[in-house]
Image: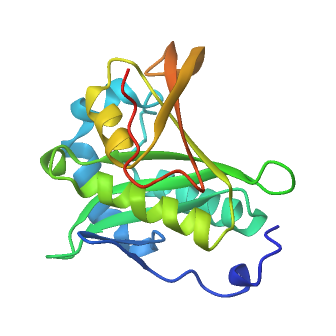
Amino acid sequence: MFALPFFRRDLPALKGDRVTLRVPLTNDYREWSVLRGESRAFLEPWEPRWNPDELDRTAWRHRLSRYREDYAQGTAIAFFIFNKSNGKLVGGITLGNIRHGVAQSGHIGYWIGERYSGRGLMTDAVKVVTRFAFDTLRLHRIEAACIPDNARSIRVLEKAGFRREGLLRSYLRINGIWQDHYLYARIEDDPPGAETKD
C-alpha cells in the first residue's frame, strides 16, 4: 500500500499542454471499446495477444477491478488520456511495477488510438506521468520498454527525455511471441529533453 498521504484521497486529473489524464470510469466503456476496436490492427503488433472477449463489457468490468486493486495495493495507476481541446478519449497510460524503498521506481506502458497517433499527444502524456511519478510519488527512476521495430514508441520516449540503456532479450510475450525490447529510462534529475544519440 502507498505510504504517502496523497493516496488517501481520490486521484485528481493530471493536466499537460495538450492532454488531460484521469483514472478510467465505468461509463468510459463505450468510447474505450470503439477506439480500441477501430485501432485493433494498429495496436495488436505491440500488445499482448487479445482475448476473444477483449472488448466485451464483462472483460471491461474485470479490467476496471484490476485497475482499482492495483491502485489500492500501490503497485500501479492506470490513466485514460483525453485530448484537452475536445475531451475525446485518445489512449491510455499506466504507471506500473511501482516500488518504493531502495528502488523508488516505476514502469510506464501506453497505447494510443490509431487516428490520434503522430500528433504529440502521447509524448505529452508520458511527460505528465513522469512529472507525477517524480514530483508526487517521489520516485527516482521511471522505465519503459519497447520493441526495437516500434519507431513511433521510440520517438515518443526520446522526445519525453528517456534514454536507451540496453536490450532486454526475449523480455515480453507480445502478440503471442516472446520479443526483445529496448529498455529506456528517465532518472529524476535528468535534464528535460535529454535524448539518446545512438
Residue 33 in sight from this viewpoint: no
The image's colouring method is: rainbow
Task: Farthest residue to the bottom: give it.
Answer: 9
- Residue drawn at 36 percent across, 45 percent down: 111
- Residue drawn at 72 percent across, 56 percent down: 75
Residue 19 is situated, as x and y percent measured from the top left of the image, at: 28, 69
- Residue drawn at 68 percent across, 55 percent down: 140
Residue 57, located in which quarter of the rendered image? bottom left
* Viewport quadrant of the C terminus: top left
* Viewport quadrant of the N terminus: bottom right
80 left or right of 33?
right
For the image, the number of numbered tags is: 0
95 left or right of 72?
left
Residue 86 is situated, as x and y percent measured from the top left of the image, at: 14, 76
Residue 115 is situated, as x and y percent measured from the top left of the image, at: 13, 48
- Residue drawn at 18 percent across, 46 percent down: 117
Viewer-proximal residue among 11 and 189: 189
Residue 89, located in which quarter of the rendered image? bottom left
Task: Farthest residue to the right: give it.
Answer: 101
99 left or right of 128?
right
Residue 94 in sight from this viewpoint: yes
Q: Taking 126 as reference, is 138 above or below it?
A: below
Q: Taking 84 as reference, is 41 above or below it?
A: above
Residue 154 is situated, as x and y percent measured from the top left of the image, at: 34, 32
Viewer-proximal residue among 116 and 51: 116
